[in-house]
Image (cartoon, rainbow, N blue to C red):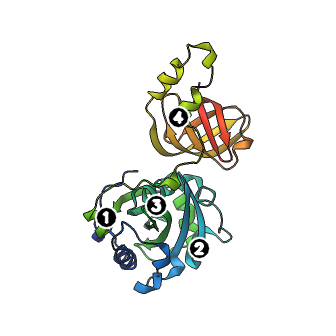
Amino acid sequence: MLFPPLSTHSIRSSNQRALLSHWNALATGERFPSLGDFDPQARDHSPEQIIVWDVEGPMRFRARSLGLRAAEVLGNGLIGKTMDQIVPETLRAISLEGAEECATSGCAVYAIITTITNGHQVDCERLLLPFGESDVVQHFIASLQLISFQGVIERQDVTRDFEMRSYVSLSGRISSDWGARNPHRVVSPSLVPEALPSVELALATVGAADEPAGAKSADLRKVVRRRLMKTGKIHFGKKHEVCAVCDISSVGALIELTRASDVPDRFTLILEMESTSRLCSVVWRKDRQLGIRFG
């Protein structure tokens, strides 16, 4: 997904525009406000439509609180679960990419996700607003609104259709007024895993005895790493697991999944929108992360 700059007028819902205005007013002297200053009822926006997420790391977001209407869409008992556990697989990439953009840019992120239900167009308007301190995005809130253009719809039907066939008809980011006057990219320490070697540096230790000292390490340090926000699926035996690919290079990648300990040392990986599988070897593993080498 691409996130070009948008204006406030791009947001169709008057409730969400009011919510954005409240967030913008709180961001005085900062790119984004603190969550403690936020009051959704200050602009007549019902907290029942809001989900509050904690930012734990790259592509990793945990539900802190869930409004009643949001729970009707996503289900109850989701507090404490991560976004990749909550969101259906077919919508996971859309959801995670928008959340990652919000967490790393410090901007509001707006998207319209469209489906067709019983021949009628239905849109899910999703607004994400970042919160934190000292230029570190620690939380964000999500406001979700379903809009039907041809009358009443059955929530169960539209949920099924969003999971089966949907597309992003609009997406982009909106800076706060202070952020627009002071443009800079937010670099959040909370988004960098602690004490985890990069994939390339870890690979430099594999088979080092077969080459002159320092040769492999020097070559691998030159490999270009690319931040990636995609869903992937790993296969081993008759099993498969969904994962998030956080960064990738020509020699390996960093992936996140629910239980890294369940994955064997060798498996295949297929990225979304790709048909070719990659044979992978685990270089290091920690909790829910794997550093892998291709081939």
Nearest the viewer among 214 and 6 is 214
Amino acid residing under circle 2? Leu
> CB of mark 1 within 8 Å of CB of mark 2?
no
Say whether residue 65 is visible: yes
Q: Which residue has dot 3 on it?
A: 136
Nearest the viewer among 11 and 39 is 39
Nearest the viewer among 44 and 156 is 44
> CB of mark 4 within 8 Å of CB of mark 2?
no
Tag 3's secondary structure?
strand
Amino acid residing under circle 1? Gly
Q: Which residue has dot 1 on it?
A: 179
* Rendering coords of residue 145 (x, y %): 46, 73
Viewer-side label of 4, 2? 2
Viewer-side label of 2, 3? 3
Q: Seen in the image, is 75 located left or right of residue 223?
A: right
Of mark 4 and mark 3, the one earlier in the sequence is: 3
Which residue is pictured at 29% across the width and 69% down the height? 177
Of mark 1 and mark 2, the one earlier in the sequence is: 2
* Rendering coords of residue 100 (x, y %): 47, 55
Q: Which residue has dot 2 on it?
A: 66
Measure the C-alpha gap from mark 4 to mark 2.
36 Å
Q: Seen in the image, is 172 located left or right of residue 219?
A: left
Measure the C-alpha gap from mark 1 to mark 2.
28 Å
Viewer-side label of 1, 2? 1
